[in-house]
Image: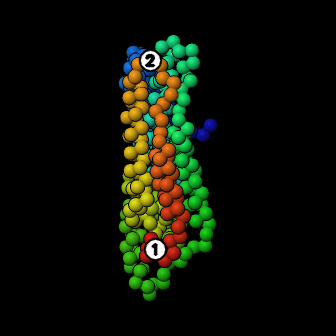
Amino acid sequence: MRRLPNWLVWHSLAILILSAGAISIVLLLPYHARVQSWVLVSAVMAAITLVAGHGVTGCWLGFLIDRTNRMSLTRLQVALWTLTIFPALFAAAISNARFGDPAPLSIAIPIEMWILMGISTATVVGTPLVRVKKTTQPAIRREKASSPIVLDEAYRLQNLENQGFDVSSFDSDEKPLVKRSPADASVSDLFRGVEAAKAAYLDLSRVQMFFVTLVLVVAYAIALGFKLAATGTIHEFPAVDAGMVALMGISHVGFIARMAVPQSGGARAD
């Protein structure tokens, strides 16, 4: 098997050691210390994610970087939900087994939670499809040199090039701008548009989706913490209000819709 350029032996060893550490945590801590187990296992799984991202891309936040060499907000969402739910499920199941529960894995996760996680995953899958469709559309030509917008466009593209974008093949405001390498990825990518017409500006739909995700993840993590702190076995996770699912859904629909809107007229369109 061909070894990935950035993946070294220490990446594999680190993941093995960290995985063993996660198992040791839930086995060595008292069986009633589920909150501590959950937090520590979450930290270990986050470390595994960082190491894997570094091994693949050469960047510690590589798990957030997509095919355009930019940090992805939808990838961040999936990572947050994964690092919140699955360590809790792991800690609860092991605790149930140590309590002597004959069905330690019988833990009901609300369907609303699966929907929330599914929305984030679907957006990760759907976003590239929107980009591909827009990329295959006829190019929207930039204005001729006689247009006053050209100076603004030149300044915008120079600004983007300074931030690591490859603007050499730019011929349409519709097409996503790709950064030169994963090393050029930035946290600012989470809040800026993808297409050339939007990449230099703050995308409020992304800001909204970031805050919605932050509120939902933190609120559910707190509820989950209280659930894990209770005595006895655990056979269900906290319920999620349907209104929260609707809020997340609306946020994602707005995000996808804004990405799909044509940017005719270059930088003037919004």
Q: Which residue is mark 1?
A: 269
Q: Position of residue 31 (x, y in %)?
A: 42, 16
| Disc 1 to disc 2, C-alpha distance | 58 Å
Q: Is residue 53 at all visible to an observer of this figure?
A: no
Q: Quadrant of the N terminus?
A: top right
Looking at this view, name the residue that lies furthest to the bottom: 146
* Label of residue 232 in the image: 2
Q: Dot 2, crowdedness within 10 Å: few (<14), some or many (≥20)? A: few
Q: Position of residue 164 (x, y in %)?
A: 41, 59
Determine the residue positioned at 53% across, 15% down: 101
Determine the residue positioned at 39% across, 30% down: 225
Determine the residue positioned at 41% across, 80% down: 149
N-terminal of the pair, mark 1 or mark 2, is 2
Q: Is residue 211 at all visible to an observer of this figure?
A: yes
Asked whether, in this view, residue 174 is left or right of residue 34, the answer is right
Query: Type of residue at label 2?
Result: Gly
